[in-house]
């Protein structure tokens, strides 16, 4: 399973429809941020991931299939998160232990805290005290359980077809495409994120 990271907050908002079931390959954040996404790419990506969830190849995703994908994703996410935490702890200790004596002094701790605050400030374009773009990751058909499944199942037949899965993703893609040219630019994604943040705060 391959995680869909479209890079558009509008597409992430369509969590009930976009298939996002595992992590994408690591790419430079700058390259992702600068990428222009087309409507056709959104449609094709949903179809690709829909096929992965449709395990019995009958052209629809049942709640059981969606729940299985969700459980598998959660297990993988938990494992990866634990590995990252362990790596970060080890790396953080090495960074803080400036004199490499195997212990962290108060001065080393304070210096590291100051550096961290400075790094966050340089990446906090909206001034909310957090790095930009951090809170909109997630969503997708691996979360297509319970209420999310019901939302995607437009005709309420207990199954989500490819058309039902694509429709919300394309609606949100069209919403983000401010100039209606069939492409979502970095600036349009930024505008969508700003609107979502304003709605969230409201």
Image (cartoon, grey):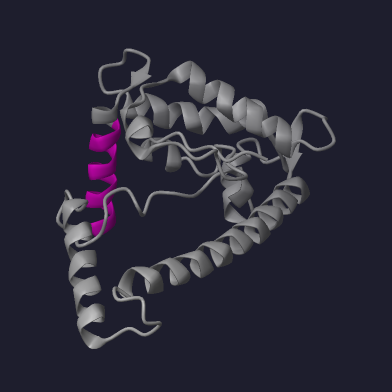
Q: Quadrant of residue 23?
A: top right
- Residue 76: x percent and y percent? 65, 56
Toward the viewer: 107 or 55? 107
Task: Please state the extent of the stretch shown in magenta in the rendering.
Answer: 189-202
Q: How many marks?
A: 0
Q: Is residue 35 above or below residue 53?
A: above
Dominant secondary structure, magenta: helix
Q: Quadrant of residue 162?
A: top right
Toward the viewer: 13 or 133? 133
Q: Is residue 108 above or below residue 197?
A: below
Q: Is residue 31 left or right of residue 138?
A: left
Toward the viewer: 46 or 167? 46
Q: Is residue 181 above or below residue 131?
A: above
Q: Is residue 128 visible?
A: no
- Residue 41: x percent and y percent? 50, 20
Quadrant where the N terminus sits is top right
Q: Residue at x 57, y 64 (%)?
A: 83
Toward the viewer: 86 or 49? 86
Residue 192 drawn in magenta: yes
Q: Is residue 5 above or below residue 85?
A: above
Q: Is residue 159 left or right of residue 58?
A: left
């Amino acid at each position: 399973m391959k995680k869909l990271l479209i890079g558009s907050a509008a597409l992430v908002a369509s969590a009930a429809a976009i298939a996002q079931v595992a992590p994408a390959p690591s790419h430079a954040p700058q390259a992702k941020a600068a990428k222009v996404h087309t409507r056709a790419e959104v449609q094709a990506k949903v179809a690709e991931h829909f096929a992965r969830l449709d395990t019995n190849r009958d052209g629809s995703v049942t709640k059981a299939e969606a729940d299985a994908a969700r459980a598998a994703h959660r297990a993988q996410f938990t494992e990866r998160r634990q590995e990252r935490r362990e790596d970060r702890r080890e790396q953080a200790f090495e960074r803080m232990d400036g004199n490499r004596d195997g212990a962290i002094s108060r001065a080393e701790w304070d210096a590291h805290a100051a550096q961290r605050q400075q790094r966050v400030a340089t990446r906090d374009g909206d001034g909310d005290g957090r790095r930009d773009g951090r809170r909109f990751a997630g969503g997708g058909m691996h979360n297509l359980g319970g209420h999310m499944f019901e939302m995607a199942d437009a005709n309420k037949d207990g199954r989500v077809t490819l058309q039902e899965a694509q429709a919300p993703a394309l609606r949100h893609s069209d919403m983000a495409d401010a100039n209606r040219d069939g492409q979502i630019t970095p600036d349009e994604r930024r505008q969508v994120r700003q609107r979502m943040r304003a709605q969230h705060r409201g």
